[in-house]
Image (cartoon, rainbow, N blue to C red):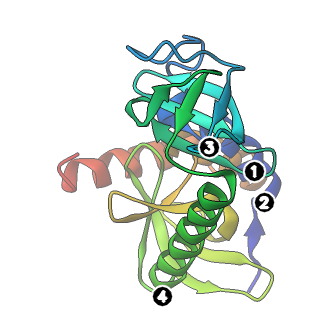
Amino acid sequence: MIFKSFTAAAALACATFAAPALAQDAGAGTAAGSGVTVGATVYGPQGGVVGTVKRVAGDNVVLDTGTMEATVPASSLGAGENGPTIGWTKADLEAAILAAQQDAAAALDAALTAGTSLYSLDGIVVGTVTEVNPEGMVVVEHTSAGPIQLPKDQMRLQNGNLTLLVNAADLAAAVSAQTGAAPAATADAAATTQTEAGL
């Protein structure tokens, strides 16, 4: 059986959607009600540097520790003598990030079983998992193109669903470009699925 691999196309499309909740307000520059701005240094409870503010989005702040990033509520930051403070040391925050990443990876592995529906970022069923190969590619029976391979590292659990971090239309375009299948067929199938799911 020949599988069509969409690693490059999916990775390119996923770059746009890696942090959808943050992307909407990322240009604001100041966390709502906190006065925390992009580029500000954030300090821990003993005054040590924890990291810098990389992005703000409404009530969330993305902290960059230099090796890791974490999204935290702006309300978790207070005002200190040197600038914004948080109740974590850098080491504690990085340990918490690592633990969360490991938990997320374990949950994703548990969801990647044959028969699991794969959703797009915009909540449309785009296929069904058939297997995960040793190279980290997930074989999916696409709703219109048949078996394709998609990168496991571009999948997450979102609202309890196994989700590819690409909108259905973008995946349909990638499938169409590589297989010659009409994107409209995929879009029609996706619309039907979405309607049936009550979305």
Asked if disc 3 and disc 1 are in contact, CB closer than 8 Å, the reply is no
Circle 1 sits on which residue? 11
Asked if disc 2 and disc 4 are in contact, CB closer than 8 Å, the reply is no
* Residue beneath the point at 47% across and 32% down: 77
One can see residue 114 in this view: yes
Looking at the rendered image, the quarter that the N terminus falls into is bottom right
Circle 3 sits on which residue? 18
In the rendered structure, which disc, 4 or 1, sits on the residue that comes first in sequence? Answer: 1
Q: Give me the disc on residue 114.
A: 4
Asked whether, in this view, residue 192 is left or right of residue 172, the answer is left
Q: Distance between the residues labelled 4 and 3?
A: 25 Å
Q: Position of residue 153 (x, y in %)?
A: 68, 65
In the rendered structure, which disc, 3 or 1, sits on the residue that comes first in sequence? Answer: 1
Circle 2 sits on which residue? 7
Q: In front here: 43 or 189?
A: 43
Q: Where is residue 26 in the image (x, y as percent from the top left)?
A: 58, 20
Q: In front here: 151 or 65?
A: 65
* Residue beneath the point at 65% across and 76% down: 138
Asked whether, in this view, residue 188 is left or right of residue 72, the answer is left
* Residue beneath the point at 57% across and 74% down: 105
In the rendered structure, which disc, 2 or 4, sits on the residue that comes first in sequence? Answer: 2
